[in-house]
Amino acid sequence: MRILITNDDGINAEGLKTLEAIAAELAGPSGEVWTVAPAFEQSGVGHCISYTHPTMIAELAPRRWAAEGSPSDCVMAGLHDIMPSLPDLILSGVNRGNNAGENAVYSGTLGGAMEGALQRVPSVALSQFFGPGNSTLADPFEAAARHGAAVVKALLDRGLWGGDGYHVFYNINFPARPAAEVKGIRVVRQGLRPDGFKVEAQDSPSGRRFLWVRGVAQAVDTGPGTDVSANLAGYVSVTPMRADLTAHDLMADLEDRLA
């Protein structure tokens, strides 16, 4: 198996090392793992692409490249310039922090997987929830490291892929607890925390005004059958996603209203 991996935390991120190990296990001794990751952290860029300026890429080692761009840029660079042929699988992560709930909308990690799906390559995003249960572990990515390959393999073997139109990609979040305490897998929908991101203003010594984006409490239950709640209960969450932003449930009613 030939696998392309990327992330949004950058080429030197600890979570990328975890993903490299997961990919190596999936690829097997005769497979290939290609890394194309941002040269610098790109957290929160979503599905951004460098449409108005070029992206510089640099080979750091065999099958290992850094790009001065977003995760989506990295995926396109890997598919259309760096790799000799298309990969069998694209993995994005392992993100430092959860990409469950509304975080998924902002996530560069998901942006990389989304681009892979738009390019019609099976793609999976992986993120590690952080909290009191794993922040003091020798390896806070332990849950992802221990269970990541098995969850992805289960999706490859029994998941739903392809189809017409927008292809499915998968969002996986690992709970914030030791690997031995992970209870299993839950297929769940994307949740929504009641409070979103905010900004905090600050004046610099020169009098200029700057805004800092502030997150909200992450350990907030988002209701039964959702990703955040599954993670808080100790389960790996798996959510099928598409890049289609249409609110399909409103189509018929809206058509009647506007007729």
Image (cartoon, grey):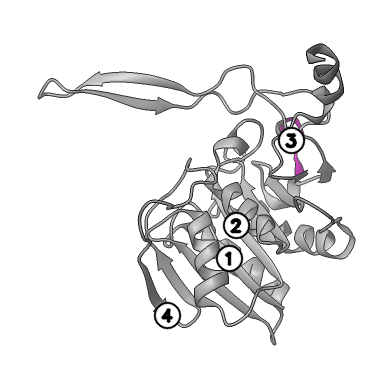
Q: Seen from this angle, which residue lies furthest top?
A: 257
* Circle 1: element type: strand
Kindly check if marks 2 and 1 are in contact, taking CB atoms under 8 A apart as contact.
yes
The location of residue 183, given as percent across then percent down, is: 81, 45
Circle 4 sits on which residue?
61
Q: Of residues 216 and 110, which is closer to you in this image?
A: 110
Circle 3 sits on which residue?
227
**Is residue 199 rendered to the left or right of residue 238?**
left
Quadrant where the N terminus is found in the figure: bottom right
The location of residue 196, given as percent across then percent down, is: 55, 21
Magenta segment boundaries in residue numbering: 229-238
Pointer 2 or 3: first along the chain: 2
Pointer 2 or 1: first along the chain: 1
Q: Marks 4/1: CA distance?
A: 15 Å
The location of residue 175, given as percent across then percent down, is: 68, 42
Q: Marks 3/1: CA distance?
A: 23 Å
Pointer 2 or 4: first along the chain: 4
